[in-house]
């Protein structure tokens, strides 16, 4: 059982049930064509919500001119004129507003909601202080004041794990509610056929899947002293440098759907070297495919990986060796307990529905 399942939310709001269709606005700076856990979480949640009959509008960089983020050109930063996001929200007049990210669009939506006294929720998807520390060389504590400032006015902050909940509580952010993650079990299963590239490489096969970027700590995986072949699946700004530095590793590029599932299912161990993720969606995808997980004992792995389905250690080599002895059937059964439907119900329960007078106020602002 997930170690988090018995933890109750610190705050409660009137839940919007799957059977009661509502209008929901989600504001996010992370969206397609980006490929990462945040985008997969949001897009899958939107798919489930729409299947249940909810009217979901996503306000994303797709809707505005944008510029590449410094040091990370794959991420686009939306360029908006003052009031543009607010007018969009006013025209939508949703029953609930959720601000998913702390970037320019999230900032604009937050400002509008506060100015118009519109309740909203946020989510803490990314360890932003640690992420920015890795990219700037500045200590993480420099960036925590912005995180506290951004999230404090929210009716609730959605978090995926108990470790992140404890971290935010230490920062004085206590209005927290649980929003887990899920797996597409129709796609990710032990039956997925391994990619043909696996037939020509020496085992054991050690796999990493995710963004190829400095904050993912991939070099810790590629430099660990363990026999076999290290396989890297994904794309990102550090791909060229790592490919040149580690020619003995197999870099397969971006894979999706059944191809990605096969990469998981055909590996002996899934290695998750990141120290900056809040959850690690790829871990439960690997487990659903029957592949045990090796990781550092940090936020994400601490909340997901049990002794039956993987191993955690500050010595990644020891974690890999221990994970190889895990029962793959147990891994698949554990991974199958993560449902997108259950996660989406948690998302709905955490929203802060607008009162009728607030929705009317939003509509009235559409003319301005």
Image (tube, grey):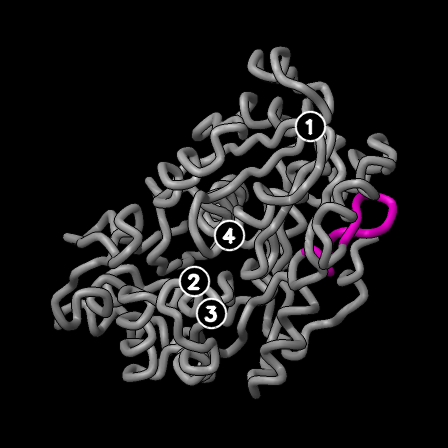
Q: CA distance from mark 2 to mark 3?
A: 5 Å
Judge depth for marks 1 and 2 and give the one in front.
1
State which region is magenta.
301-312
**At which x and y percent is residue 327?**
87, 34
Q: CA distance from mark 1 to mark 4?
A: 22 Å
Q: Is 39 drawn above or below residue 209 in the view shown?
A: below
Q: Earlier in the sequence, mark 3 or mark 4?
A: 3
CB atoms at circles 4 and 2 under 8 Å apart? no
The answer, for residue 171, to whether it is visible in the render is: yes
Q: Is 106 drawn above or below residue 1 in the view shown?
A: below
Judge depth for marks 3 and 1 and give the one in front.
1
Q: CA distance from mark 4 to mark 2?
A: 21 Å
Q: Earlier in the sequence, mark 4 or mark 2?
A: 2
Query: What secondary structure is marked by label 3?
Result: strand
Q: CA distance from mark 3 to mark 4?
A: 24 Å
CB atoms at circles 2 and 3 under 8 Å apart? yes
Find disc 1 in the rendering and name its residue: 228
Find disc 2 in the rendering and name its residue: 100
> Horizontal placement of 85 versus 339: left or right?
left
Query: For residue 275, what is the image quadrant?
Result: bottom right
Q: Residues within 10 Å of mark 4 (few under 14, many from 20)?
A: many
Q: CA distance from mark 1 to mark 2?
A: 40 Å
Residue at position x 64%, y 65% in the image: 178
**At which x and y percent is residue 25?**
38, 59
Find disc 3 in the rendering and name its residue: 122
Q: Earlier in the sequence, mark 1 or mark 2?
A: 2
Find disc 4 in the rendering and name its residue: 216
């Amino acid at each position: 059982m997930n170690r988090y399942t018995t933890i109750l939310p610190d705050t409660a709001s009137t839940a919007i049930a799957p059977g009661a269709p509502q209008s929901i606005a989600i504001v996010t700076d992370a969206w397609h064509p980006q490929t990462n856990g945040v985008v997969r979480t949001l897009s899958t949640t939107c798919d489930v919500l729409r299947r249940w009959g909810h009217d979901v509008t996503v306000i994303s960089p797709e809707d505005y001119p944008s510029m590449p983020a410094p040091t990370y050109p794959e991420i686009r930063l939306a360029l908006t004129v003052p009031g543009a996001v607010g007018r969009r929200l006013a025209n939508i007049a949703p029953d609930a507003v959720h601000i998913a990210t702390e970037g320019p669009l999230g900032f604009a939506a937050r400002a509008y909601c506060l100015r118009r006294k519109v309740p909203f929720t946020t989510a803490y998807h990314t360890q932003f202080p640690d992420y920015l520390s890795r990219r700037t060389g500045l200590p993480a504590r420099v960036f925590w004041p912005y995180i506290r400032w951004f999230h404090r006015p929210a009716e609730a902050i959605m978090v995926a794990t108990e470790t992140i909940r404890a971290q935010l509580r230490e920062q004085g952010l206590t209005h927290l509610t649980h929003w887990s993650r899920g797996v597409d079990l129709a796609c990710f299963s032990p039956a997925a056929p391994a990619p043909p590239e696996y037939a020509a490489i020496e085992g054991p096969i050690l796999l990493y899947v995710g963004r190829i970027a400095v904050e993912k700590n991939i070099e810790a995986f590629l430099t660990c002293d363990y026999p076999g072949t290290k396989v890297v699946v994904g794309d990102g700004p550090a791909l060229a440098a790592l490919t040149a530095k580690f020619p003995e590793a197999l870099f397969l590029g971006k894979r999706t759907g059944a191809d990605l599932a096969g990469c998981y299912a055909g590996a002996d161990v899934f290695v998750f070297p990141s120290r900056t993720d809040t959850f690690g969606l790829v871990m439960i995808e690997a487990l659903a495919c029957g592949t045990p997980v090796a990781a550092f004992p940090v936020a994400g792995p601490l909340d997901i990986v049990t002794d039956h389905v993987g191993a955690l250690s500050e010595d990644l080599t020891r974690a890999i060796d221990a994970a190889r002895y895990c029962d793959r059937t147990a891994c698949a059964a554990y991974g199958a307990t993560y449902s997108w439907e259950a996660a989406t119900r948690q998302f709905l329960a955490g929203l802060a529905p607008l009162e009728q007078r607030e929705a009317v106020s939003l509509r009235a602002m559409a003319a301005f």
